[in-house]
Amino acid sequence: MKAVRIHRYGGPEVLVYEDVDTPQPGPGQVLVQVRAIGVNPIDVSVRADRFPTPRQPPKIIGSDGAGVVAAIGSDVLTVAVGDQVMFTGLGVGSEGSYADYAVIAEAQAVAKPPSLTFEQAAAMALVFPTAHYALVRRAAVQPGETVLVQGAAGGVGSAAVQIARSLGARVLATVSSQDDARAVEELGAEQAFVRHGIDVSAQVKRLTEGRGADVIIEPAAADNMAVDLAALAKGGRIVVVGGGSGGQATVPVGVAGGRDAGLLFMSSSNAGRAGTAQILGELATMAAAGTLQAVIGAVLPLAEARRAHELLEQHHFGKIVLVP
């Protein structure tokens, strides 16, 4: 089969599209013929060795995808050959999803609703459970609360806007262009701000009658912590879903204490394989019903994985998807 592997760590140039042996499923495992793959920032981190993993090069990268079950191992009871599935959670202790075929655990297989394309399913697989985990498990968002989504044009951000809205929250958002602002407002944000050149906290305070946001979803804590604290309501919660450019955030303790601020860190992998699959299954059902939608910005052949990684590190809106 064809796959994209790294033989050393580095930039997009280390991604090699090559022939490798087709894997076979072991006990409790499922072999999926991959039809679509989501491209995620964690893939870049693995490629650049910013996210150390147990499996060392050469290795196939990639976290998630969607496809058709081609074979099952012994003891597999809930999945059958021919099932259409979506999955996430590969590429850390296992080979990844940038390939014609991928082996997943039975617990990772989520039935793909017939109304979703493989590309839509792959675009949801990692970012939607991450956003759900941040909003529901960590922040426990309640109806009527105000949620500020920083970086709402990204994969997790665009998912968080939709999920927060489905929870009955009022959603504000920051983006980097007017086009992104319009797109994010179409997804359900009441107002999206172009964050460059404005005082984000002042805008949030203005729209909340001086109170601030109850919850802030933060993908770049190292860059935005001071802004987040200034925009936060007393007793509010900041959920850190990403470190940002520096990887380390400085917290002004006096300001945080004065707001009774809750600073929450998270990794959706803490839900476990079965827990993450359950969340993804619920979100896929919502997408099939039209409550949520996968946002796809570009679809490229798997052979152009280098180009996909270059696009990921540039300004873009929506998920980048690879197709074998």
Image (tube, grey):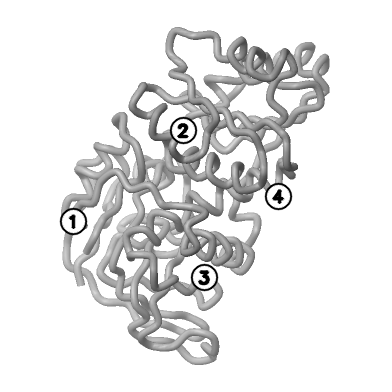
Amino acid type at circle 1 is Pro
Question: What residue would you read off at disc 4?
Answer: 137
Q: Nearer the viewer, residue 90 or 230?
A: 230
Residue at 28% across, 52% down: 6
Q: Secondary structure at mark 2?
A: helix
- Comparing marks 1 and 2, which lies closer to the viewer? 2
Going from the N terminus, do you reach mark 1 or mark 4 first?
4
Whole-angstrom CA distance, mark 1 to mark 4, is 35 Å
Residue type marked 2: Glu
The vertical placement of 161 against 30, above or below, is above
Does 146 sit left or right of 243 as displayed? right
Can you identify the residue that label 1 sits on? 301
Q: Position of residue 268 (x, y in %)?
A: 60, 51
Q: Pinpoint residue 211: horizontal percent, then vertical percent.
A: 75, 18
Nearer the camera: disc 4 or disc 3? 4
Q: Which residue is mark 2?
A: 185
Q: Which residue is mark 3?
A: 108
Q: Is residue 195 left or right of residue 70?
A: right
- Dot 4 lies on which element? helix
Instruction: Report the amino acid beneath label 3.
Output: Gln
Q: CA distance from mark 1 to mark 2?
A: 30 Å
Vertically, is 218 above or below 32? Answer: above
The residue positioned 41% from the left and 59% from the top of the image is 64
**Residue visible at 52% across and 83% down?**
28
In primary-sequence order, the first of circles 4 and 3 is 3
